[in-house]
Image (tube, rainbow, N blue to C red):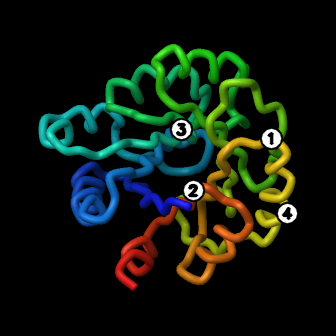
Amino acid sequence: MIVIPTIFEKEFERAFERMEKVGEHSMWMQIDVVDGKFTSGKTFDLEQLASKEIVNKDWLFDVHLMVDDPEKWINKAIMAGASRITGQVEKMTSVEKFVEKVREYRIEVGLGFDIETPAEKIPEGTDLILLMAREAGFEPKEIDERVWEKIEMAKKWEIKIGVDGGIKKEHIAKLEEAGVGVAYVGKEYLNIVNE
């Protein structure tokens, strides 16, 4: 299992500071993008990732689109240097079209499912199922225990499973044992990698 740090910030300066800290431990970073429609609040403009200071780094961006109509954000994510794009299915007009459009860029594509959304309708070509382990948003929340059952159910798709939200050090071994391929970790990331 790989543990990927999440970048979930409203201001680019704070996001970049966090990238530099976690970038010493991980090439991969999940860039959370929120437009104020999927959940309250907004993150920094995705276009800011295309700046020279970012381009010169060896970081790989796993862009998580928690936005209205994620398909319309694919080009922005590509311009920002995404290596994987994951969109929340709740705001998609067509899950199949989203997967197809991302695949055109020859990068990985993921489908995100909020804690209340069953993981279903997984089109061929999907590389990752991202299960939210808590309700999306800026407020800190504990992991929702329902995620363990969702992990078991998602295994039937035989696709890499990612879990995001509320993950702490004590959850890592259990996630790996459950068959999770990627754990996305916020503020606890440095505590986990520095143990």
Res 35 label: none
Distance from Cα at disc 3 to Cα at disc 1: 22 Å
Q: At numbered mark 2, what does the secondary structure look like: helix, strand or loop?
A: strand
Classed neighbour count for the residue bearing mark 3: other residues with Cα under 10 Å, few (<14), some (14–19), many (≥20): many
How far is the residue under mark 1 from the one under mark 4?
Answer: 14 Å
Marker disc for residue 65: 3
Q: Are marks 3 and 4 in contact (CB under 8 Å)?
A: no
Going by the numbered disc 3, the residue's amino acid type is Leu
Provide the secondary structure element on which disc 4 rests.
Answer: helix
Residue at figure coordinates x 57%, y 16% from the top left: 101
Say left or right for 34 vs 121: left
Residue, disc 4? 149
Q: Is residue 168 above or below residue 158?
A: below
Q: In the rendered structure, which disc, 4 or 2, sits on the residue that comes first in sequence?
A: 4
Please give the residue where the numbered disc 1 appears in the rendered image: 157
| Foreground of the two, 120 or 136 | 120
Q: Earlier in the sequence, mark 3 or mark 4?
A: 3
Q: Identify the residue under disc 2.
A: 182
Query: Which residue lies at the image location 60% right of the left edge and 48% below the top edge?
Result: 39
